[in-house]
Image (cartoon, rainbow, N blue to C red):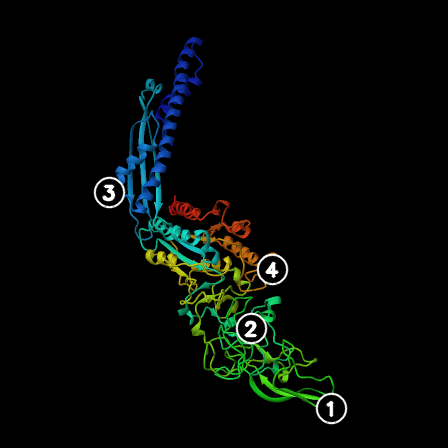
Amino acid sequence: MFRLPVIDRIGRPFARFVKADQGNIAVIFAIVLVPILSFMGAAVDYSRAVRARSSMQAALDSTVLMLSKDLTAGTISTSEINAKATAYFTGLFTDTEAQGVSVTPIYTAASGSTPATIVLNGSGNIKSDFMQIAGFPTLNFNATSTTTWGNVKMRVALALDNTGSMASDGKITALRNAVAGTGGLIDQLSALSKTNGDVYISVIPFAKVVNLGASNYTQSYLDWTDWLNPPTTQPDNGSYQASLPINWHAYGPGAKCPFSNSSGGFYCTTGPTSTSSTSTIPSSGSYSGYICPSVDANSHALYNGCWTSEAAGTGVFCSGSGSCACPKDAWNNAISGCSCSGSGSSKSCTGNLYVHNWTQPGPNDTTHNTSQPRVSAVVGWTNNKYTSTNTTPTVLNDYRLASTNPISNWTGCVADRTQPNDATGVLPTSSDVTTLFPANEYFENSTAYCSSSASTTLGAVLPLSYDWTTLKSTVNAMQPTGGTNQAVGLAWAWQSLLVGGPLNTPAEDANVTYNRVIILLSDGLNTEDRWPEYGNGSSQASGNPIDARQALMCSNLKAAKDSKGQNMYTIYTIQVNTGSPADPTSTVLQNCASSSDKFFMLTSSSQIVTTFNTIGTALSKLRLAR
């Protein structure tokens, strides 16, 4: 605010006049009239000056923001600040009564933890109408505006849908252009960076899983439990949980395969991790007697071992009854290798017995995976038999040879973490397996999507980077792959922003303010995750528990606060809904956004580009401190 000195000069005599009690009325009235008219005139002139100053303040505020944006983007150099300030201000300041107007910018470059600053000072005056009689022909006014930047840095995580449906309606192409094309989001954000590290971006392509890259198989943050265990000990899948057949102890080389897709989600193959099916257990070759499960049709995961058939002598399956018979397989056929003798109460059926160990490391294995969890799965029954009084498997795995598929063959897939940490950002620690990330061999539509040799590969995540060329290459290499699990993409976007996490996120400076942003785009509703009971790609459990877990994660993200008590993350969500009939609005995506204006419902591929441009513009403004 500014002060008019005339107020003091007129006010003091007027105060003395109020106390006087002599003189006639006419004289008094004449004397009083002059200051009263002066005060009224001063109020008029004062309001004109205030109006002019307010207009100047608004013009200065806009000018200083545009100057800082131009400097940040490299549109102007520091030597052009004065001329540009005058040009911007002249176009914005519209008060016609102001005269003698001038603006003076003062630019201070960033240094260390000290931010860059522009202070813009403005001054001017108006010609007075009434105050001239009091000796004030003009009224001066001034204003100032400041913008600071450079102490605010930005970290943006892009969780981008790479599922099969992105191939339709040009969506994957539009997404590549929106993010990595000329003038796309990467270009917009890179323009805000004057120094390496001012802006970081991570890219998280996701389908049912994310790909961390096969070279990371030695990392301590990985959980190898699912990889090592047989189908019967995979995560609790409810009705999809595989079980051992009743006559398990009688199956051996030449017997019919005891599994089918209808009974466990898988069938038998000719060897470990093979895609060649077989109707009988091999009786010759390297894998004679091996009972190898195929890809699970429910979980879309490849198993990395087989059950052996180790001869355990012969045994009596039943005796003492005329109804005694050889065990039958799942197709109601007598298992080979069994024969019966006698009749009536003297009848007895005997045959070969087998021990079935799973060909991943047991407690005594020292050949492979010596620093990894041991398989403790149940693989048979007490005394290797099933009876009417002994129906619970109790024999633990004890395999002592080399693994049939060691962890070094992992192609990079990881699935959702074990609950409750599938919905948290807790950092991994070896002392708590629920904080580790489950290695997985995702296999759907006859494709191992994380394999570099796949016809369509789910690209590996790219941690925070300011290598704009690599970022663009990563986005442009994205391909449509498998089913939709937004939660795993969101989880890794979160991990990419956490210092001390598995993606080697750069350290943060306590003296710097960070804008941490997550952008999650998906073109469909969630269909599958680590638990087939939740969703197996074709059907979902009632209430869609995939969405429920994701909603909990969103709630945890939005509740996270920084050291100043401010929201730690800004979340944008985008639903691309081009199908016919269209999907319903994703409630979990809509509610996950930080605010209603940060959720976007798109009905055409062309809107992907404009939406990312809108978000980029918003982030450009967010980059400025004030």
**Which residue position is annotated with label 1?**
346
Q: Position of residue 26 (x, y in %)?
A: 43, 8
The residues tagged by marks 3 and 4 sit, at their Cα atoms, a distance apart of 64 Å
Disc 4 is placed on an element classified as: loop
Nearer to the camera, 74 or 445: 445
The residues tagged by marks 1 and 3 sit, at their Cα atoms, a distance apart of 109 Å
Q: Position of residue 11 (x, y in %)?
A: 39, 22
Q: Position of residue 597 (x, y in %)?
A: 48, 44
Contact flag, marks 1 and 4 (Cβ < 8 Å): no
In the rendered structure, which amino acid carries the disc numbered 1?
A: Ser
**Which residue position is annotated with label 4?**
541
The residues tagged by marks 1 and 4 sit, at their Cα atoms, a distance apart of 52 Å
* 96 to 564, vertically: above or below: above
Which numbered disc, 3 or 2, marks the residue closer to the eye?
Answer: 2
Q: Locate residue 325: give its quadrant.
A: bottom right
Contact flag, marks 3 and 2 (Cβ < 8 Å): no
The residues tagged by marks 3 and 2 sit, at their Cα atoms, a distance apart of 74 Å
Contact flag, marks 1 and 2 (Cβ < 8 Å): no
The residues tagged by marks 4 and 2 sit, at their Cα atoms, a distance apart of 24 Å
**Which residue position is annotated with label 2?**
267
Q: Position of residue 140 (x, y in %)?
A: 32, 28
- Check the image and name the residue furthest to the right: 345
Q: Is residue 512 visible?
A: no
- Mark 1 or 4 closer to N-term? 1
Contact flag, marks 1 and 3 (Cβ < 8 Å): no
- Mark 1 or 3 closer to N-term? 3
Side (left or right) of 619 relative to 525 = left
In the rendered structure, which amino acid carries the disc numbered 3?
A: Ser
In the rendered structure, which amino acid carries the disc numbered 2?
A: Tyr
Q: Residue at x 50, y 70 (%)?
A: 302
